[in-house]
Amino acid sequence: MLTLLNLLSAVALLVWGTHIVRSGIMRVFGADLRRVLSRSIDKKPMAFLAGIGVTALVQSSNATTLLVTSFVAQGLMGLTPALVTILGADVGTALMARILTFDLSWLSPLFILFGVIFFLGRKQSRAGQLGRASIGLGLILLALQLIVEAARPITQASGVQVIFSSLTGDILLDALIGAVFAIISYSSLAAVLITATLTATNVISFQVALCLVVGANLGSGLLAMINNSGSNAAGKRVALGSLLFKFIGCIIVLPFIHVLAPQLDRLPVNDEELVIFFHVFYNLIRCLVMVPFAGPMASLCQRLIADDTESDARIKPKHLDRSSLDTPALALVNAARETLRMGDVLEQMLNTFNNVMHGQPREDRVIRRLDDDVDVLYTAIKLYLARMPKEDLPEAEAKRWAEIIEMALNLEQAGDVLERMSGDVADKSLATQRAFSPEGLQELEAMQEKLKANLQLSLSVFLSQDINSAKKLRRAKHRFRMLNRRYSHAHVNRLHQQNVQSIETSSLHLGLLGDMNRLNSLFCAVAYSVLEQPPEEREEE
């Protein structure tokens, strides 16, 4: 029982080490990897090589699949280049499996030692995150040693030998067990290593080992389907295409295993090495052959999985991909894009408010619904950013994190103000049939147009962080306040002239001017956070 526990803990350590490497590399090179993948989508060979390279860095084809799936789900990458990239990722993980099976045990303590020194000493810097990746790589090498050492006594147990002795030729059963190995261990690499160990100790035959390896590859495809079960239709198509490619490979190879195994067994290489080499060349040949069929496979997946249909008219978060949370640069971009969607909804609210001022009471309900949409997006952005490990963020990314939270909060408060303004107009003007004076309505319309222009400029400043645009927004804020004051004085002059409409709507009119002033302040607050940047940061931009 203790030996089995040691094996399971070694597999868990392998999974954890892979996660640490992935998170460290993605925090340092996440944005660069995104650019590499986005620039490699035009040509299939480049997309294939990009898949190999990214997988070599993050040490996991599952991580590459999640990254590519998130790009497809957000419309940043087409389905066909995504499938080619994942085929390259399958080759990359097979090559890394071969490299990691060399005797690199002496590197494990070095990686862990230097990784801890850099990570603890400079935790929020690039060097610190590379130290995190070094720790993960050391844990992977250590876990591989522990897996081999823990598997040996298990394979020598008589009960285990009896169980595995039943795997004597049923290729479908053997492949299914290999798939189960990969799913349980959360890694086709661990399943292949265990298979190689079982082969080296003569617990299973070489033919059975080959079936287990093919099944382990199929299991990694099933694992990708499970991981992307909550994704949208575009993301599910990527996982389905990858699974179908692996399934086709199984169907083609498994019937010839009984012919292929004796031929390979004649090579002057021990069975353990042969299992690893078979894993590499099986993936290499399968993926190269299937690259030209990525287009037809994409078409098939699009027919099998229909586009998402909205169950209701309510807005939903679109860009908050959870798989990007380990990559702060990507996660912050996602949150910023969702914040821009809040701004778009606010602009709709401003346009609808103009209709309310012109005597359309039903539009008040539209504003209430739009404000609910703003609240939904704000809550989603807030919870999304709360899941990010803020304490590990570099200073620049921590500042951007705070800017996004502040911008989203300001837009949410602006939505509440607009909803209240609309309700006031509906209750105090439309319901009582008290209309604004023509001059007063014209002034309110002018203020509303200024608000919309300032909102658009503030969203541009928020996205670009441009200093000149921020200065322009600050000047626009001051001009708005001066215009607001002038219109307030004009309204008082109309009261002095005994304008009946102005007298009837005076409280409402002045209240709207005050609320508009507050909206303007909320929209323009982003200018000050940009202008407060140190001079050296401005020069870098």
Image: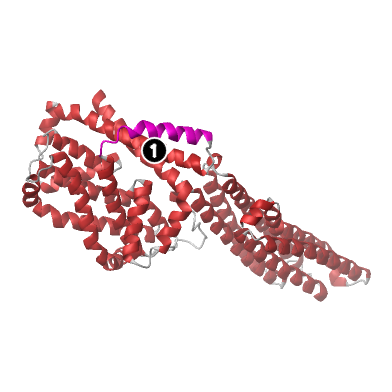
User: Is 117 included in the stretch rendered in magenta?
Assistant: yes
How would you rate the neighbour count of disc 1 (Cα within 10 Å): few for under 14, some for 14-19, many for 20 or more? many
Q: Secondary structure at mark 1?
A: helix
Q: 496 or 447: nearer the eye? A: 447
Horizontal placement of 530 versus 25: left or right?
A: right
Q: 217 or 125: nearer the eye? A: 125
Rendering coords of residue 115 (x, y %) = 44, 35
Rendering coords of residue 423 (x, y %) = 70, 61
Rendering coords of residue 507 (x, y %) = 83, 61
Q: Quadrant of the C terminus?
A: bottom right
Q: Quadrant of residue 310?
A: bottom left
Rendering coords of residue 361 (x, y %) = 67, 68
| Residue 192, placed above or below residue 540 | above
User: Is 232 included in the stretch rendered in magenta?
Assistant: no
| Residue 131, placed above or below residue 77 | above
- Residue at image x 42%, y 63%? 39
| Residue 495, placed above or below residue 407 | below
Horizontal placement of 537 versus 439: left or right?
A: left
The answer to whether one can see residue 12 in this image is: no
The answer to whether one can see residue 398 in this image is: yes
Q: Mark 1 — residue?
A: 136
Range drawn in magenta: 102-121
Magenta-drawn stretch, dominant element (helix, strand or loop)? helix
Q: Amino acid at mark 1?
A: Gly
Q: Quadrant of residue 519?
A: bottom right
Horizontal placement of 349 versus 496: left or right?
A: left
Q: 389 or 226: nearer the eye? A: 389
- Name the residue at the right extreme: 496
- Residue at image x 43%, y 50%? 323
- Name the residue at the top extreme: 2
